[in-house]
Amino acid sequence: MIFSTLDDLRAACRDLPAGDEAAAAAALARQAVLTKPPGSLGRLEDLAVWLARWQGRPIPRLDRVSIAVFAGNHGIAARGVSAFPIEVTAQMVANYAAGGAAINRLAETAGAALKVVPLDLDRPTADFTKAPAMDEGEFLAAVSAGYAAVEPDLDLFAVGEMGIGNTTAAAALCAALLGGGASRWVGRGSGVDDHGLSRKRDAVEAGLARHGAKVADPLAIAAALGGRELAAMMGATLAARRHRVPMLLDGYIASAAVLPLARMASDALAHCRAAHCSGEPGHKALLPALGLVPLLDIGMRLGEGTGAAVAMLLARAALSCHAGMATFSEAGVAEKTC
């Protein structure tokens, strides 16, 4: 889908299909008769039912699994907010193509196809302390690119990102839509020193001062403070919902990217699960605001979709038990009597 106006995008954000509650109920009923005490597999049981709800199958499958990594460059990086130069974004995209990054290895391990989508890397967004990061056309083009990256017949989908400076954009977006100022949301990102951390906080505060009047419109503030890869992840998340594809969100940047969508519709992320809690401190505050509980908390903070790829292994474990375990009657095992 190509969005030509913000009103078109707003309409799509309001037209969100529900999951299949009959399939979810059937999956829950199956969980109740498998050879285990009720609830003894914890969140693996919840994952199986969630997959059933959004796939519309009492016994889900994970045959077509995909991760999309969106890459974008940020004008705010010129203010010294990252430990790495902006050229690293394109260099890492080349590394993905060569198969040399962590996400290549983890996607392969998770049995997921990997798609990398670079977004105008030779044209960084504007420095949001001086102007909106993107004008309306640039923002809509990035959202549309993300939407187009989601195949409608996927069994499970995840997003990741690469973009020097994007933890600053994510922090600015969170501060604008959730409050608390830069100190609540800014972390060290790629590993900046104390001076870099101070520059990041100053940049976020300056961006809020310049664009604060737009906070009532989540899409307008996403264009003003975000980045192309953030906009694309929001578009991909919207597409997954409209195609009824269950989705795993990666870390801080991916979660910040979908915050505008969540602000537009209270149940917009019902088809999503948070793959993990990032080591970036703002993520711990953001996840409760999104109503998400992470599946993993193991100190990952790389981005690239790596946390989501690891969480896909949990989804496969959940499905293996849900689909493959015997029921009490099949195994000739007595059920609970009290």
Image (cartoon, helix red, strand yellow):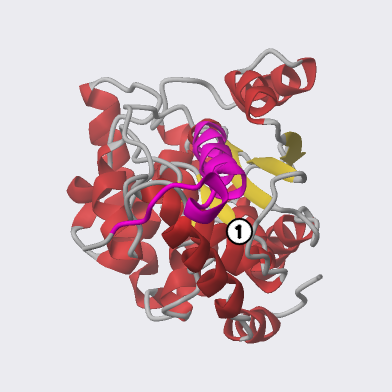
Residue at the image position 38 percent from the left and 52 percent from the top: 334
Residue 112 point in image, percent of width and height: 71, 35
Q: Crowding near pointer 1: few (<14 within 10 Å), some, many (20+)?
A: many
Q: Quadrant of residue 145?
A: bottom right
Say above or below: 224 vs 107. below
Q: Is residue 126 visible?
A: no
User: Which quadrant of the rendered structure holds the C terminus?
Assistant: bottom left
Residue at the image position 58 percent from the left and 45 percent from the top: 319
Is residue 77 rendered magenta in the image? no
Give the extent of the magenta segment. Answer: 308-336
Judging depth in this view, the residue of 320 and 20 nearest the camera is 320
Is residue 328 rendered magenta in the image? yes
Would you name the residue on which mark 1 appears? 246
Residue at the image position 65 percent from the left and 28 percent from the top: 107
Look at the numbered disc 1 and give the secondary structure of its residue: loop
User: Which quadrant of the rendered structure holds the N terminus?
Assistant: bottom right
What amino acid type is highlighted by mark number 1?
Answer: Pro
Residue at the image position 34 percent from the left and 58 percent from the top: 174
In this rendering, position of residue 154 left or right of residue 259: right
In this rendering, position of residue 1 left or right of residue 317: right
